[in-house]
Every structure is written in structure tokens, then in C-alpha cells.
């Protein structure tokens, strides 16, 4: 959806004049002509959209372990610092887990020591058997048995060492889980959402449950505006933006287009794109989630010659040309307006620039400020019996009606 808005430095004094029946052909036809003046002023082309406000940086604070919420130390709108404790989970299960892990470590260390002693004994027996076998005092199979016993003890010792390492890691893991029952803030900010209460159970088996939502800094917001695909080509980074929110209808907030995201959103077969707009919020009036009416200024011309759009859209019919004593309309190879010239009208080709829906910029052409151009012609009733044209609304067929400002 595109809508062009007119943002004017001052209300334009557009003298829209109605001249009634200033031409009559053969005494049986008349024309009521509506004209407007060419003026000088500003033309601003804008695109209108809607969007929602959000914090630039928002962090979800969750729990990596499951448990029952034992205490909460922050609430909505709380100002928090990095490292500040926000909540605690019941640590009883994790205290038990760490004690069990420590017991398993002690057992693993004892097994390691026992097997180490067995290895020393096996090495001693192997050395004795080797000496005796060299003197041929024992059978060869006894030497083989001593070697197997020593190798088996060595393998058991290495396995026991791995068990000790595993048990020590289990103790460290249990300690880490116990520490995670204390949930701290990862950033400085303000709490904008709290999702749990004391006594509530949080389960972190599949995904980390969110306990708090913290905004880093509400003095700098961003606006996520939905831009229609037909307007996307005109949206660029750096364009100025004005927007309003329902909470402060008399205030106009300003920002700048920061990014146009290329991820399309299709809703009811309507394709829109997200334009991210920076929104300074020094007074903290803007709150996350507010809906904003956005006006993006895509083009602006100040102090330019301009003509009403209605004058460019006006195309006389053959009957109008006959009543106005104009031979024929020239071929329309470029935009054209019809200018009042004495008691007739003449076509004037022009070159136009941007438009805001009410006014169009004149780039080239012979028109000057104050020139009257035709915006409408209505064929009137038959002329009076005296051969004069029908009277105007104000009773004078040659005098204009009262001016009406646009």
C-alpha cells in the first residue's frame, strides 16, 4: 500500500478560481472552467508503513538446568547489572549429585592405588622369575605366567586411571550444575519480562526455559516497519523517518533507515519486507512493543515551481475544445497542462519531476509562478436568449468565484 502525503513548509495559497461560462459558441453552449495557480514551495514524497518498536539488544536469560525456582531477586522494570543474581533454583538435588560424584572419585582413586600395588608386586615376581629361569631353576611356564600377570596388572592400572579421570570430571560437572542453579544477569540492562514465579518448576531437558527478558539500553530503540514490496525499491539506508505512537499522539519522533532486510514475509498473499529504523529515545517515552505509524521521506524538493496534479491529469474532450474555441489538442508526447490565455486556453508541454499526490514539480516549461492552469472544465446549460453565456455562481459570468485554498 502506497500513499503520498504532502508535507509543506506552509499552507500553500493556491488560488483555485472558478470562471463561469467565459466562452460560448453560437450562443447555445457554455463552459465552467476551474483553474489553479502555479506556485513555488516544497514537495516531499513519502511512503507510509506501520511497525513495532523493540530494544536494539534484547537478551533472554534462561536456565541450563532443571529445578524448582527457590527465589527471585528481580522483577519487571528492575535495573540490573552484569553478574547480578536474578534467581536461584533449589540446589538439593545438585548437592546430592556432587556428593555422589565425590564418593565415586574416592572409590576410583582407591581402586587405582590397589591396582598400582598389584602391578608393583607383579613386576617384582616377574623379575624373580626371570632370574630363576635364567638359572633353569623354574619351568618356562612359570616365567610366562609372571609375564602375563604383570601385563594384566599394567592394563588394569591404565583402566583404573581412566576411571579416576572420569570420576573427577563427574565431580566437576556436578559442581558446574550446582553453580548453574544460581542465575545471574549476563548484561547491564532493564528487565522487561519475567516468565516464572517462586515454586515453579523449570525443565531444561529439551531447551533452556526463559526466565527473564532483559533489554540492554532503552535510550536507543529500533523500529521494525513492514514495507510493501511495491515500495521496496525506494527505501534506502540513511533515509529520514518520522513516526508517531498512540501513547503520544501529539509527539513526532524521528529516526533513520538503518537496514532493509531481504527476508520476505507473506501475509494473505501480500509480500512485505522489514525496514529497520533507528529510533533515539532519550526521554524513554518509547516502550518495546508499541505500534508506530511510520512516514519515510524518499524524496524532497524545496522551493521549486510546482503545478497541481489535477492540472496534469486534465485532458479536454472534443466538446470542451469546441466550446473553448480551440482548434484541436496537440499530440501528447510529453506531460501537458492547459494555460489560461486571455479568453482562451492553450496547451503547454512541460517536464515534470517528483510528485506528492497533490503537487508535481515543474522542471522545464514556460510556466511561471502565478500562472493559472486549468484543472477542470464542465459544459454548462444553453446560453440565454440575449446570446450571453450562463451566469456564474456569484452572478458575474466574467468574475471568478471566491478563492478556495488547497
Image (spheres, helix red, strand yellow):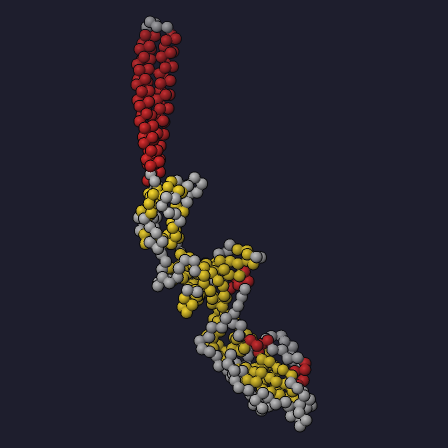
Name which quarter of the figure residue 123 lies in: top left
Q: Looking at the image, which residue sits at the far front?
A: 199
Q: Is residue 299 visible?
A: yes
- Residue at 53 percent across and 74 percent down: it is 358
150 versus 348 height, above or below = above
397 versus 52 height, above or below = below
- Residue at 42 percent across and 68 percent down: it is 249
Horizontal side of residue 341 vs 118, given as left or right:
right
Horizontal side of residue 390 vs 127, given as left or right:
right
The mark tally for this picture is 0
Where does residue 31 sit, x and y in percent of width and height?
63, 85
Q: Locate the N terminus and report the quarter of the image it occupies.
A: bottom right
Horizontal side of residue 1 vs 182, given as left or right:
right
Where does residue 317 sit, x and y in percent of width and height?
66, 79
- Residue at 38 percent across and 11 percent down: it is 144
Name which quarter of the figure residue 152 lies in: top left
55 versus 199 height, above or below = below
77 versus 171 height, above or below = below
Q: Is residue 169 visible?
A: no
Horizontal side of residue 63 vs 233, given as left or right:
left
Q: Looking at the image, which residue sits at the far bottom?
A: 386
Name which quarter of the figure residue 391 lies in: bottom right
Where does residue 173 sit, x and y in percent of width and height?
35, 35
- Residue at 62 percent across and 78 percent down: it is 315
Nearer to the camera, 318 or 147: 318
Amino acid at each position: 500500500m502506497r500513499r503520498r502525503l504532502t508535507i509543506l513548509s506552509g499552507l500553500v495559497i493556491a488560488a483555485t478560481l472558478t470562471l463561469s461560462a467565459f466562452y460560448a459558441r453560437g450562443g447555445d453552449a457554455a463552459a465552467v472552467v476551474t483553474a489553479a495557480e502555479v506556485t513555488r514551495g516544497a514537495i516531499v514524497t513519502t511512503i507510509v508503513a506501520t511497525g513495532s518498536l523493540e530494544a536494539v539488544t534484547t537478551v533472554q536469560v534462561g536456565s541450563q538446568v532443571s529445578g524448582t525456582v527457590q527465589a527471585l531477586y528481580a522483577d519487571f522494570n528492575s535495573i540490573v547489572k552484569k553478574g547480578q543474581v536474578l534467581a536461584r533454583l533449589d540446589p538439593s538435588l545438585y548437592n546430592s549429585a556432587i556428593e555422589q560424584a565425590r564418593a565415586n572419585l574416592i572409590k576410583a582413586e582407591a581402586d587405582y592405588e590397589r591396582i598400582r600395588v598389584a602391578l608393583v608386586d607383579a613386576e617384582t615376581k616377574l623379575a624373580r622369575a626371570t632370574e630363576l629361569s635364567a638359572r633353569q631353576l623354574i619351568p618356562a611356564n612359570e616365567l610366562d605366567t609372571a609375564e602375563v600377570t604383570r601385563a594384566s596388572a599394567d592394563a588394569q592400572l591404565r583402566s583404573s586411571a581412566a576411571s579416576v579421570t572420569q570420576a573427577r570430571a563427574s565431580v566437576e560437572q556436578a559442581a558446574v550444575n550446582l553453580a548453574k542453579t544460581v542465575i545471574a544477569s549476563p548484561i547491564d540492562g532493564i528487565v522487561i519480562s519475567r516468565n516464572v514465579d517462586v515454586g515453579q518448576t523449570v525443565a531444561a531437558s529439551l531447551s533452556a526455559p526463559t526466565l527473564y527478558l532483559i533489554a540492554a539500553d532503552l535510550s536507543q530503540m529500533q523500529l521494525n516497519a513492514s514495507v510493501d514490496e511495491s515500495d521496496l525499491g525506494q527505501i534506502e539506508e540513511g533515509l529520514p523517518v518520522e513516526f508517531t505512537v498512540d501513547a503520544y499522539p501529539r509527539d513526532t519522533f524521528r529516526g533513520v533507515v538503518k537496514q532493509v532486510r531481504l527476508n520476505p514475509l507473506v501475509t494473505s498473499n501480500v509480500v512485505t519486507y522489514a525496514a529497520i529504523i533507528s529510533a533515539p529515545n532519550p526521554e524513554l517515552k518509547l516502550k518495546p512493543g508499541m505500534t508506530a505509524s511510520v512516514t519515510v521521506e524518499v524524496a524532497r524538493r524545496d522551493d521549486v515551481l510546482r503545478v497541481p496534479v489535477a492540472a496534469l491529469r486534465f485532458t479536454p474532450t472534443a466538446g470542451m475544445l469546441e466550446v473553448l474555441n480551440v482548434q484541436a489538442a496537440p499530440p501528447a508526447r510529453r506531460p501537458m497542462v492547459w494555460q489560461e490565455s486571455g479568453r482562451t486556453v492553450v496547451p503547454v508541454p512541460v517536464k515534470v519531476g517528483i510528485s506528492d499526490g497533490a503537487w508535481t514539480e515543474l522542471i522545464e516549461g514556460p510556466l511561471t509562478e502565478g500562472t493559472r492552469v486549468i484543472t477542470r472544465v464542465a459544459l454548462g446549460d444553453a446560453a440565454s436568449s440575449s446570446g450571453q453565456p450562463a451566469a456564474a455562481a456569484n452572478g458575474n459570468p466574467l468574475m471568478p468565484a471566491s478563492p478556495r485554498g488547497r
